[in-house]
Each structure stands twice: as C-alpha cells, then as structure tokens.
Image: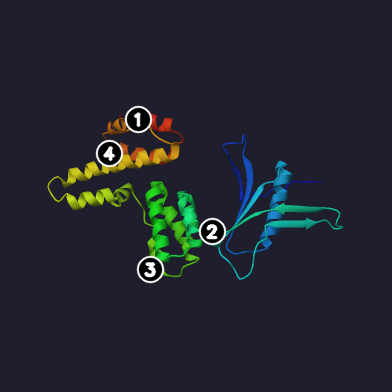
Amino acid sequence: MLTFPKQILDGLLDVTFAHRPHTDPFLIEVEVYPDRETLDQLRDDAAMVILARGVLPDILIIVLCPKGNAVIPDEIVVPSAHGMSELRLRIRVVNLWTLSAELLLATNDVGLILWVPLTQWNGPPEDLLRTCREKIVNDGPPREIGNLLAATRTMAEMRYNDVNLLRLLEEIPMTMEKVYNASPFIQRLRAESQHEGLREGMREGKRETSSQLIIRRLTKRFGGVPLDFSAQLAAVSNETQLLELVEFAYECDSLERFLAAMSSHQ
C-alpha cells in the first residue's frame, strides 16, 4: 500500500509569477555551512512533493558561510539498484559569500538586506553595516524596521566578532517620530529655525516629510500617483491621520485602495 507522508515541509513555498496562471512550488533550504546531508533531505522532500502534488518543485539552497573545501553540488543523481534507472535532480545553490554586496544593495529590495553582511565586500565592514542600516531605516516599512535590523545583525554576527561594529545594527524601535528626526530635511530645519517659529516649522516639516514618504513609496510600488495627488494629500489636515496614511502606503495592495483611504480622511 502507498501512503503519503504526513509531514509538512517547512521550506515549501507556493510562488506567484505575473506571467503564469497558477502558483509554482519551490523548495528552499537555508544552511549555515555546506553539508552533503542536505542533499538527502532535499531528495526526500522533492519526492514528497511529487507524491502529494504530481509536480517537481524548483529547488534552491542558500548557504550562508564557507567551511573549508566543503561544497554542495548542484546536481543529485540517485541510481537504481541494478543501474537500469536513475533519478537526476538539478539544484540551484547560492553561496552567499560569492555574491557581490553592491549588486544586492542595488536591487533596492529591503527584504534582501539581511543577507548583505555575508556577501563579498572589499571596503571597511563598518561602511557595509552602516549602509545596511540606512537602507533599512529609509526604505523599510516602519513597523518592520526593528525586526529587519535584528535579523541583519544576526547574520552579521556570523562574520564579524566586534561588539562595537555590531552596534551599528542594534535593534532600536523606529517610531515614525524617529524616522522624521533622521530626515536631513528635519535636521536642516532644526539648524536654521532658532526662533519663536521653531515649533510651527517642525510641524510643517513633519507634514512635508510625511508627504514625501507617501509619494515615494506609492511611486515605487505602483509606478506613479495622479497629477492632483499632492493637492489631495494636502487636504488631510489631521496629523494622526497623515501618519496612518504613511503606514498604509507601505501595506496597501493597490493605489486605488490608498486613494479611497485618503479620501475618507479628508
């Protein structure tokens, strides 16, 4: 009797592509060091997906750190007992230390930043970690900045054993107030506004920074905003509602939903 295994694969993802009508299964394994035993596990996992779904998944292994001369081959060949048949699996193996940090940073995908400390970098390590932090703070969703910094620091600890260096990635809760305070615009406003109108200037600066964050994020996610968008945004007078719109710009699934939310706040 043939029975299906009941184990649920942790590394099995169903991935959606714009040009395909349905999701495709991917088996993804993350290994700290190269380990050939991983191949046996992936062979079994691939067989499990074939039995359960009738399709072969794409297989990806991400290896974080090198270990001597050990390597994970990009192909598995399993022969039958009498050599009349064989099972051959091709695998995509990504050794992080062989990737360029510059290329990964150039993708402008904040979700990839946590891998960057383990990639190739020819400059001072403090410059690399400082760049990672700036990318996370400037481009990360406000609610996830602390988590992204913590995950990136965890990866950096595998390569660097310097407490002072790792402090560049300390997990500091980044409220929207701190994001504003880190803005060059706000810092310039502080330096130039040493008079009675400072409080009002800070309030206007915070509004302008919020608008810039919203427009930049929506343009990056959806390709642009309507011509009268700035005027519509200026009609939102409540500061709390404006902050809510900043966060929604990172989370909404379409520009239309954001415009509807903005209209309800006017």
- The local secondary structure at tag 4 comes to helix
**Amino acid at dot 4:** Glu
Q: Contact, CB < 8 Å: mark 4 with mark 3?
A: no
The answer to whether residue 175 is visible is: yes
Circle 1 residue: 227
213 lies above or below 234: below
Choose mark 4 or mark 3, whichever is in front.
Answer: 3
Circle 3 residue: 164
Check the picture and name the quadrant holding the C terminus. top left
Disc number for residue 219: none
260 lies above or below 106: above
Q: CA distance from mark 1 to mark 3?
A: 47 Å
**Amino acid at dot 1:** Leu
- Mark 1: give few (<14), some (14-19) or many (20+) Cα within 10 Å: few
Q: CA distance from mark 4 to mark 3?
A: 37 Å
Choose mark 1 or mark 4, whichever is in front.
Answer: 1
Choose mark 2 or mark 3, whichever is in front.
Answer: 2
- Mark 3: give few (<14), some (14-19) or many (20+) Cα within 10 Å: few
Q: CA distance from mark 1 to mark 2?
A: 40 Å
Q: CA distance from mark 1 to mark 4?
A: 23 Å
Disc number for residue 239: 4
